[in-house]
Image (spheres, rainbow, N blue to C red):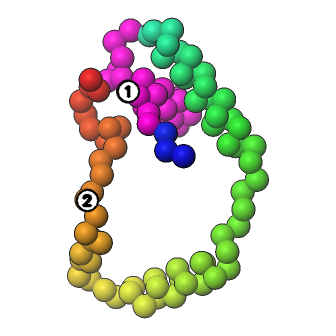
Amino acid sequence: MRVKLSNDDRCAIDLVLEQRSGDGTVSEHCFGKSTASLQKRVEKVEQLFDLMTQMPVAEPPALLLAQTLKYIQQHQHDTTARPDSGKAATVSHSMLNRPLQ
């Protein structure tokens, strides 16, 4: 299932993450005034994150860990940049220093 987030959804997620990080900043780029709709979205995001913290954390498969460590050891002395896989780079809106529209 693919879910499309609205700008208010994105702002709500940013606000909750910033609040939980404890750095004391508030995303002023998300909104100029607090709307009831945005507040409801923030509450839903908080509920979702609280639910996620209650989920058990599974250990990664041993094979994944072994393969990752093997890759790191094989490439620890590589100094050249690797070309990416041809996929276009994506930039999260939270990385941009501009208001969402």
- Please say if 90 is above or below 95: below
Residue drawn at (51%, 8%) of the image: 36
* 1 displayed left or right of 81: right
Residue 74 image position (x, y, % from top left): 43, 91
* Residues packed near mark 1 inside 10 Å, few (<14), some (14 to 19) or many (20 plus): some
* 46 displayed left or right of 74: right
Residue drawn at (27%, 38%) of the image: 96
Question: Mark 1: which amino acid?
Answer: Asn
Question: Mark 2: which amino acid?
Answer: Ala
- Where does label 2 land, which residue? 88
- Please say if 24 is above or below 68: above
Residue 79 image position (x, y, % from top left): 26, 83
Residue drawn at (39%, 85%) of the image: 76
Give the residues in magenta. Answer: 4-33
Q: Does residue 99 appear in the picture of this structure? A: yes
- Where does label 1 land, which residue? 7
Residue 24 is a magenta residue:
yes
